[in-house]
Amino acid sequence: VKDNVLAPYGHVCSASDACSVGLERTLSTSSPCGASVCPTPTALLAGPAEISDCPSTTIVLDGSASSLGGIVRPTYEWSVVAVNTTNAAAIAAVLAVLPATQSIVTIASALLANGSGGLERYVFNLRVRSFLGFASEQARLEVVRSGRGPSPIVTIEGPLQRSVRSSEALALASYATIAS
């Protein structure tokens, strides 16, 4: 494979094969998508808005519905902001060493502050980046740790986004479990 040349995915070019006959393409660093506009990545972050104050509670952050507008998977940049908690640095340290391809993250209960019945708040951010270096707007999710005791966990089955017209009915399937 020559510098600045693309070949079919998974293909190793040799001097005698098709890579040298019409399948190569030079990329411009100033205009990598040619005359068309490069697709803008979109970060979508799903997770709970509130978690129980039970000691075994975890937070699952899901960025798997994020997209680049193409077939190549994005890379994920996770971060957390301390709002009303003292352990954001520990969570940030875990997020910092995640593989760039990790789209779903579980924050273990040991990392979540177990305050004195107060409302701990965590703000999680996700930015996705294309292989060409284009970045999405930052998606934000604020999670509150309730001081009201165990909360049931309600899960809605299906995709993270669904579009329907206002004149159409929308049915959702869900199930609830008791927090442990």
Image (cartoon, rainbow, N blue to C red):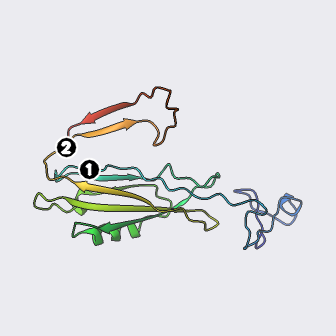
Kindly identify which residue carries mark 1: 50
Circle 2 SS class = loop
Pointer 1 or 2: first along the chain: 1
Would you place residue 30 above or below residue 161 in this image?
below
Q: Residue at left 89%, top 60%?
A: 21
Which dot marks residue 158? none
Residue found 32% across the figure and 49% down from its top: 48
Q: Single out the residue that lies furthest toward the left.
A: 116
Q: Quadrant of the C terminus?
A: top left
Counting from the top left corner in percent of width and height, residue 20 is at 87, 63
Relative to residue 162, is residue 67 depicted above or below? below
What is the x, y in percent for residue 158? 44, 36
- Furthest-front residue in this view: 167
Q: Is residue 100 left or right of residue 173?
A: right
The x and y percentages for residue 106 are 34, 55
Crowding near the residue tagged with mark 2, few <14, some 14–19, many ≥20 C-alpha atoms within 10 Å: some
Residue on which disc 2 sits: 151
Q: Is residue 58 left or right of residue 172?
A: left
Q: Classify mark 1: helix, strand or loop.
A: strand
Q: Is residue 26 left or right of residue 50?
A: right
Q: Is residue 167 left or right of residue 96?
A: right
Structural crowding at the residue carrying mark 1, measured as other residues with C-alpha within 10 Å and reported as few (<14), some (14–19) or many (≥20): some
- Proximity of marks 1 and 2: CB atoms separated by less than 8 Å: yes
Q: Nearer the viewer, residue 138 or 79?
A: 138
In the rendered image, residue 129, in percent from the top left (x then y), is placed at 56, 63
| Quadrant the N terminus occupies | bottom right
Residue type at numbered disc 2: Ser
Residue displayed at 25% across by 63% down: 111
Q: CA distance from mark 1 to mark 2?
A: 9 Å
Q: Amino acid at mark 1?
A: Glu
